[in-house]
Image (tube, rainbow, N blue to C red):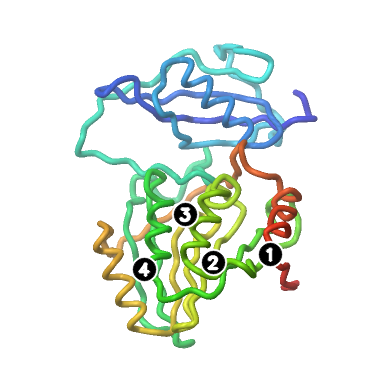
């Protein structure tokens, strides 16, 4: 096995037509998970899969005894796939949670069933530190627009921070503050322009701050939307607006961070960690010492 590159397995889900869903399996080499995934996605599309999305993945070159299945078909030197698709009938009333770009289920057995994860939110009353807490899970299909809506639901903003997590290339967690990004409009514009390296990056937390209630709105590395505030009116108004765009509160709350094996990744169109930090500095972000 070529140790100069990474080797990944992908379970993709898509459709063959408006009545038939499909699962397909790929094994690809590349420079990182997102690069490998892009090759699997393109192969799936070439095989007739419509709008494939990632469900499960696993890094294979870290496994000592992995061998390709005997029936795996070689597409080229980087790509192998299983020749048989698993198909099923599409039923309009059924919805299955698709992990947002940047995070995916692993292949190991989970503590909970994946179908327990639903689009919903939880809200907690003021804790001992005087903070009201909110957390929301959204499907891949509408996470980004939901986060943009959530930014709009905040009081006037005055801060924008990006945490780069330590498990991205095994470095320390780093914090950057966008000194020129204050208004909601400018923050959303920056995120839209850099969506591959920010919103779709499974190695960073994005935080928008408002002075009112010392409020923080976070899209975390597990692609959950979180609100923390000391102002009860901010909390209640925010929840009311979230309900208004179709989300429901629940007590049966499951998310990919807890009880599920999972992988973080960045897309093939995103910047690497060094290039990402360079871009932030060019955009007048200031690195804040947190270590």
User: In the image, is residue 237 above or below residue 241?
Assistant: below
Q: Earlier in the sequence, mark 4 or mark 2?
A: 4
Q: Is residue 56 above or below residue 252?
A: above
Q: How many marks?
A: 4
Q: Residues within 10 Å of mark 2 (few under 14, many from 20)?
A: many
Is the residue under label 2 in contact with that under label 3 (CB below 8 Å)? no
- Pinpoint residue 125: horizontal percent, then vertical percent: 35, 80
Of badges 3 and 2, the one in the foreground is 2
Q: Which mark is residue 153?
A: 4
Task: Tell me whether circle 4 and circle 3 mark residues in contact (CB < 8 Å).
Answer: no
Q: CA distance from mark 3 to mark 2?
A: 25 Å
Mark 3, other Cα within 10 Å: few <14 / some 14–19 / many ≥20: some
* Residue at image mark 1: 285
Nearer mark to the viewer, of 4 and 3: 4
Looking at the image, tell me whether mark 1 or mark 3 is earlier in sequence order: 3
Mark 1 closeness class: few <14, some 14–19, many ≥20 residues within 10 Å: many
Instruction: Find residue 250 and report its image quarter.
Output: bottom left
The residues tagged by marks 2 and 1 sit, at their Cα atoms, a distance apart of 13 Å
Write down the residue under mark 2.
207
Of 67 and 138, the residue lying toward us: 138
Q: Secondary structure at mark 1?
A: strand
Task: Return the x and y of residue 147 as percentages of the image width and height.
Answer: 42, 58
Estimate the x, y position of residue 111 in percent, counting from the top left. Answer: 45, 51
Residue 229: x %, y % from top left:
44, 79
Q: Mark 2: which secondary structure?
A: strand
Answer with mark 1 or mark 4, whichever residue precedes in sequence.
4
Label 3, on which residue? 259
Residue drawn at (48%, 57%), measured in percent from left and top?
Answer: 258
Please say if the residues under marks 1 and 4 sit with CB atoms less than 8 Å apart: no
Left or right: where 285 falls relative to 245: right
């Amino acid at each position: 096995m070529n140790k100069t590159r990474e080797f990944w397995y992908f379970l993709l889900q898509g459709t063959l037509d408006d009545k038939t869903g499909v699962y397909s399996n790929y094994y690809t080499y590349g420079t990182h998970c997102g690069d490998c995934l892009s090759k699997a996605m393109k192969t799936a599309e070439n095989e007739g899969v419509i709008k494939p999305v990632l469900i499960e993945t696993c890094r294979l070159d870290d496994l000592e005894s992995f061998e390709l299945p005997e029936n795996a078909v070689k597409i080229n030197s980087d790509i192998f796939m299983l020749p048989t698709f698993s198909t099923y009938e599409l039923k309009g009333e059924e919805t299955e949670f698709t992990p947002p770009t940047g995070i995916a289920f692993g292949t190991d057995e989970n503590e909970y069933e994946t179908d327990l994860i639903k689009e919903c939110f939880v809200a907690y009353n003021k804790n001992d530190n005087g903070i009201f807490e909110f957390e929301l899970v959204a499907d891949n299909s509408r996470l980004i627009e939901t986060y943009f809506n959530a930014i709009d639901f905040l009081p006037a903003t005055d801060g924008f921070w990006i945490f780069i997590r330590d498990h991205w290339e095994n470095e320390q967690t780093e914090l950057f503050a966008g000194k020129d990004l204050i208004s909601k409009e400018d923050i959303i514009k920056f995120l839209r322009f850099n969506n591959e390296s920010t919103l779709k990056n499974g190695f960073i937390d994005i935080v928008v701050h408002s002075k009112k209630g010392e409020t923080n709105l976070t899209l975390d590395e597990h692609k959950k939307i979180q609100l923390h505030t000391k102002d009860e009116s901010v909390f209640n108004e925010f929840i009311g607006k979230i309900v208004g765009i179709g989300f429901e509160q629940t007590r049966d709350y499951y998310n990919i961070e807890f009880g599920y094996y999972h992988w973080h990744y960045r897309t093939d169109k995103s910047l690497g960690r060094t290039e990402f930090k360079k871009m932030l500095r060019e955009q007048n972000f200031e690195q804040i010492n947190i270590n």
